[in-house]
Image (cartoon, rainbow, N blue to C red):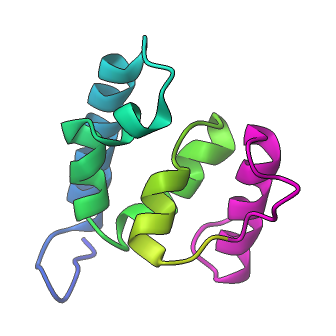
Amino acid sequence: MTTSVASGVSEADVRDRFRRLAAEWKEQSRYLSNTAQMAMLKPYQQIIGMGMPAVPLILEEMRREPGQWFWALEAITGENPVTPEAAGRVRLMTDAWLAWGQQRGLFRP
């Protein structure tokens, strides 16, 4: 079993927590269109609170199903690889973040 040295929490536990919170967030945000409201939901904020261990999981989720994870990624990483031309275009924004994650070795293609 792999564990995070800093917290003693296994990768499986981090993955399980992320999946649970992501499912809760998707359920709670299902009828919202305002991204700020979506990002303020408790499960989303808890995912942000997971910090860098959540980033590869978010990227994997985005690869499967593009969604409004941009706020969380920027909050956690302090970066934003999305070009002005891609802003507001979910598929292009997703592609920018996936390329960013691949360049940093944060997930497998």
Q: Give the residue furthest to the left.
A: 8
Image-based side of 71 in relation to 105, left or right: left
Q: Tell me the quarter of the image containing the C terminus.
A: bottom right
On the question of residue 109 being in view, the answer is no
Please tell me whether residue 71 belongs to the stretch shown in magenta.
no
Side of 84 where 13 appears, left or right:
left
Pinpoint residue 80: horizontal percent, then vertical percent. Answer: 63, 70
Q: How far from the left and from the top, in percent, is residue 96?
A: 77, 61
Residue 107 within the magenta-colored segment of the rendering: yes
Look at the image and tell me whether residue 16 can be seen: yes
Identify the residue shown where x is 11% and y is 78%. 8
Q: Quadrant of residue 89?
A: top right
Q: Residue furthest top?
A: 31
Q: Residue at x 29, y 41 (%)?
A: 40
> Quick one: which residue is furthest to the right in this view?
85
Q: Residue at x 67, y 46 (%)?
A: 63
Q: How many marks?
A: 0
Quadrant of the drawing holding the N terminus:
bottom left
| Residue closest to the eye, 42 or 107 | 42
66 up-or-down from 3: above or below: above
Q: Specify the quadrant of the image occupied by residue 50.
A: bottom left
Pick the front one: 24 or 87: 87
- From the viewer's side, name the closer residue of 57 and 68: 68
Q: Please give the name of the residue rendered at 33% of the width and 40% of the height, measured from the top-left corner.
A: 19
| Residue 9, position as x, y percentages in the image | 15, 70
The magenta region covers 81-109
Position of 56 compared to 8: left or right?
right
Residue 51 percent location from the top left of the image: 31, 70
In the image, 31: left or right of 8?
Answer: right
Relative to 62, say whether 24 is above or below.
Answer: above
Where is residue 42, by image quadrant?
A: top left
